Amino acid sequence: MIDDLPSGHEQNDSNDKKPETVQPAVVTHASGTNSDRYKSAEYEKTAQDYFGVAYQWVRLTAWGKWLKPTIKSSGFWTALATVTMAVTTGIYTYYARKQWQAMDSQLKQNTQSFRMDERAWVEIGNIEKTVFPPRPPFGTFFSFAIYAKNVGKTVATDVRIHIDETQGDPSLSDNEKAIRMFQDQLFLKQGTNERSVTPNKPGPQTLAPEATSAVPIYAGGQEPRKWPNGTFTYSFILGRIDYVDAFRTPHWKHLCFIITDRRGDLAHCQYGNDEDNNLENPN
């Protein structure tokens, strides 16, 4: 039999809960071997740092011993001033040259733009047609008086107009190579690669701004001719105009026309009406 408990204490029955157990925190320490290795690495790093500082100090000391008497000498300051002046002059020259190049480029662009706007442009002014009655077995013949006009703002000199006629099937109208060869041959002396001194037909040698030539260049042709096999032969008028503008830049213009019907209407060929793209480069 169990004795009574002292006053103030009561016996716990079987339903009472047990007190909670608090687990102590567990701290894991590095083993002795790893700790020693870590400390060894720290010592090595510290030694290297001290060695580096000492090495730099020795270098600076040696440099200072050489530099101190050098700075005191007048030759050092003379050399320093010379080098500084040379560097400054070089930098100034570089930027001055860049600025000059930019200004020169802008000037050339402005000059070229001005000349393009002010140069001579020689074109076909107008074409007057004369009709001749048919002459069997041929059809109607036509004569064309072609006038050149300077549509530019300055005089055109050394104007040379070369025009000729030829006949062919309609495919010649879009045969760029054949048309160009025919036109450029008109510009040359026959059988040579030299420029023709005079046109093959009379024409103006100088054209003032907005002026039309007083004397035309004549060319002829006939209406399209149909052959028994159903094919047609057409008349073509091909030519080239050459001139020099007021800024001494040479220019040229091709022309190519085809007589399309019995009324003598002219149409531009598909090719052969181009002109040069020579730049007005400042001299």
Image: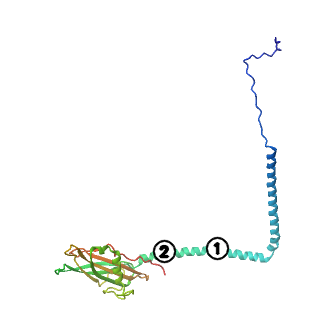
Residue 122 visible in the picture? no
Looking at this view, is 80 or 11 the one in front? Answer: 11
Query: Residue 253: x percent and y percent?
Result: 36, 78
Query: Residue 131: x percent and y percent?
Result: 20, 79
Q: Which of the 4 image quarters holds residue 179?
A: bottom left
Query: Residue 114: x percent and y percent?
Result: 45, 76
Looking at this view, is 243 or 213 the one in front? Answer: 243
Residue furthest left as drawn: 136
Residue 167 visible in the picture? yes
Question: Given the image, on which type of amino acid does mark 1 rest?
Answer: Ile
Looking at this view, is 88 or 39 the one in front? Answer: 39
Looking at this view, is 182 or 102 the one in front? Answer: 182
First in sequence: mark 2 or mark 1? Answer: 1
Query: Residue 111: x percent and y percent?
Result: 47, 77
Q: Which of the 4 image quarters holds residue 259?
A: bottom left
Q: Is residue 119 left or right of residue 83?
A: left
Q: Residue at x 35, y 76 (%)?
A: 177
Residue furthest bottom as drawn: 197
Q: Residue at x 48, y 74 (%)?
A: 109
Circle 2 — which element?
helix
Instruction: Tell me the residue that label 2 is attached to.
Output: 109
Q: Which of the 4 image quarters holds residue 269?
A: bottom left
Instruction: Tell me the residue that label 1 is attached to.
Output: 91
Question: Given the image, on which type of amino acid does mark 2 rest?
Answer: Gln
Q: Crowding near pointer 2: few (<14 within 10 Å), some, many (20+)?
A: some
